[in-house]
Image (cartoon, helix red, strand yellow):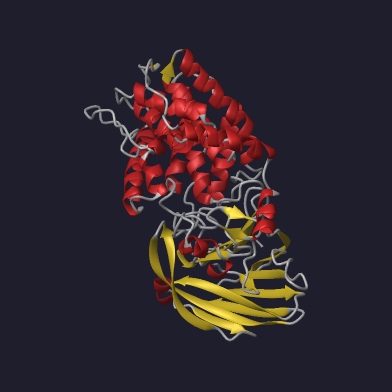
């Protein structure tokens, strides 16, 4: 069983990942990181930054501190985020911070985030950061994460571009040119036509969009010629963020996403507005008497259904993640989240762990998401902490926009390996005060199916929601969800299960 699963996992890899893996292992074995000797001088005489840029930098510092405090000490994630530089700000009286006592700091990803934060601090006037910035940028340049690609390699490019913008000299020019080359290669690859990031996580989308905006601001402030591609990509990415902005100012938690792992969505939009890339255009909420509407983010595969100020729904009906980097994929095909009167009611499980442990297994499993589990297996073959073998392939079949409702029909084939090759087909119909969920299993031989809904416990009571199963006997149990990493909140889980015999149907209605 293990060897076929490994083969299914490796089949998705990009050839570059396979070729670069031995090189990455060899570099890791070298141990010692680069020195700070002969560090390039930092530029001076920057024009005053926008107050929004300053506010964003300070907010990121505070967010980083709070998140680090919530992550267990001794974990790899804690070591990574400790090296990010959340202590770096504009205070001119503090000594230059250093985290190089931990070898993790020399890993290219934390070095990339740190380089970006150091560059921003230098732009804001903090002195004495040349040596720190040199070590970070040198760590990135010697260990580009070609074996991982995706958000890691893009963060490498952003870190180098930011470092090269605020420094000067031959080496700084190398950082800028190398970072620019990586962005020229990876921005068209990673940002989809609809503006979404191809790993299909709103958190990673916002973190990368914010990094790109910082690179644009730093490059412009330094008098660099900022490529048109950066501006165009950032503009599309901001439009996508606007589309997935929920009524409470947050975003869907599909795949690996949490509120504390990325800048606040509205702060990213404000930073884009300061650069002239985004015009808020008034209140982001729907008019009080607005009727039903929908938006299909086709490349991402998400569908947004709205009914005025009564309801807002996000539906995941596309690919489960990036083609060759599924590390942040969850087995959540055809899951959704629902906001009632501006409050998140039907919730995603969130992220409780990044370690290879039972919490991580639960985080990614189909059974913890608002969708149908067949035969007790996951819709995508998630395993270890960041691996995926067989992948669910979902598609939108039909969109419907009526006078009194909006609806979407979709299906996926993630259970095709089971006897009878069952397919899960789902229809969501949103009315002013009701959501109708119609599930159908096509095919399948003598197995089980279970449809689940996870609701925030407090929202369930405040909104006086009624949950009714049609063709299902719903059971209710206690659970949790994690809006922030490893910070559980009480949830109520409704389950409706049945036997599959050449097909199955199970409908649920939510009324408010």
- 181 or 15: nearer the viewer: 15
x, y (%) of residue 188?
65, 36
* Figure quadrant of the N terminus: bottom right
Residue ID at (59%, 53%): 387
x, y (%) of residue 127?
29, 23
Classify 323 as above or below 510: above
Task: Residue 109: tell me if it is visible.
Answer: yes
- Asked if residue 100 lies left or right of residue 23, the reply is left
Classify 425 as above or below 223: below
- 227 or 329: nearer the viewer: 329
- Asked if residue 55 lies left or right of residue 385, the reply is left
- Asked if residue 211 lies left or right of residue 232, the reply is left
Count of numbered circles on the image = 0
Residue furthest out toward the left: 93
Classify 137 as above or below 110: above
x, y (%) of residue 328?
55, 52
Residue furthest out toward the top: 170
Task: Residue 404: tell me if it is visible.
Answer: no
Q: Quadrant of residue 394?
A: bottom right
x, y (%) of residue 463?
44, 74
């Amino acid at each position: 069983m293990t060897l076929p699963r490994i083969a299914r996992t490796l089949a998705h890899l990009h050839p570059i990942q396979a070729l670069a893996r031995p090189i990455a292992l060899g570099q890791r074995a070298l141990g010692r990181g680069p020195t700070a000797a002969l560090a390039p001088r930092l530029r001076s005489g920057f024009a005053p930054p926008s107050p929004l840029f300053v506010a964003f930098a300070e907010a990121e510092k505070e967010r980083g501190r709070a998140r680090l405090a919530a992550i267990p000490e001794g974990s790899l994630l804690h070591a990574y985020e400790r090296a990010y530089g959340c202590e770096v700000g504009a205070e001119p009286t503090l000594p230059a911070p250093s985290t190089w006592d931990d070898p993790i700091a020399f890993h290219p990803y934390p070095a990339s985030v740190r380089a970006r934060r150091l560059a921003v601090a230098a732009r804001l006037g903090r002195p004495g950061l040349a040596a720190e910035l040199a070590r970070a940028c040198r760590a990135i340049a010697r260990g580009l994460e070609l074996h991982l690609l995706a958000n890691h390699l893009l963060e490498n490019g952003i870190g180098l571009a930011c470092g090269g913008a605020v420094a000067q000299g031959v080496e700084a020019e190398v950082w800028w040119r190398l970072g620019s080359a990586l962005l020229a290669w990876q921005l068209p690859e990673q940002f989809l036509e609809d503006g979404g990031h191809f790993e299909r996580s709103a958190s990673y989308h916002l973190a990368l969009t914010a990094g790109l905006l910082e690179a644009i601001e730093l490059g412009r402030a330094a008098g660099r010629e900022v490529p048109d591609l950066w501006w165009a990509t950032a503009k599309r990415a901001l439009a996508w963020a606007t589309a997935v902005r929920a009524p409470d100012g947050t975003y869907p938690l599909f795949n690996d996403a949490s509120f504390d792992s990325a800048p606040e969505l509205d702060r990213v939009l404000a930073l884009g507005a300061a650069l002239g890339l985004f015009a808020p255009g008034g209140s982001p909420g729907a008019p009080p008497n607005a009727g039903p509407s929908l938006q299909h983010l086709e490349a991402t595969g998400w569908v947004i259904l709205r009914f005025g100020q009564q309801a807002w729904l996000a539906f995941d009906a596309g690919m489960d993640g990036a083609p060759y980097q599924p590390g942040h994929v969850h087995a959540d095909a055809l899951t959704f989240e629902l906001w009632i009167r501006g409050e998140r009611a039907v919730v995603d499980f969130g992220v409780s762990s990044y370690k290879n442990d039972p919490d991580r297994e639960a985080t990614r499993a189909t059974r913890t998401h608002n969708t149908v589990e067949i035969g007790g297996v996951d819709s995508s073959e998630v395993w270890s902490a960041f691996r995926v073998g067989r992948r669910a392939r979902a598609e939108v079949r039909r969109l419907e926009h009526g006078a009194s409702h909006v609806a979407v029909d979709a299906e996926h084939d993630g259970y095709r390996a089971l006897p009878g090759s069952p397919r899960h087909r789902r229809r969501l119909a949103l009315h002013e005060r009701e959501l109708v969920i119609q599930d159908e299993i096509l095919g399948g031989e003598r197995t089980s199916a279970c449809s689940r809904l996870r609701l925030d416990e407090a929202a369930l009571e405040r909104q006086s929601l009624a949950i009714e199963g049609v063709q299902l006997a719903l059971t209710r149990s206690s659970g949790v969800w994690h809006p922030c990493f490893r910070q559980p909140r009480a949830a109520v889980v409704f389950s409706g299960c049945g036997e599959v015999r050449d097909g199955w149907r199970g409908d649920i209605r939510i009324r408010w």
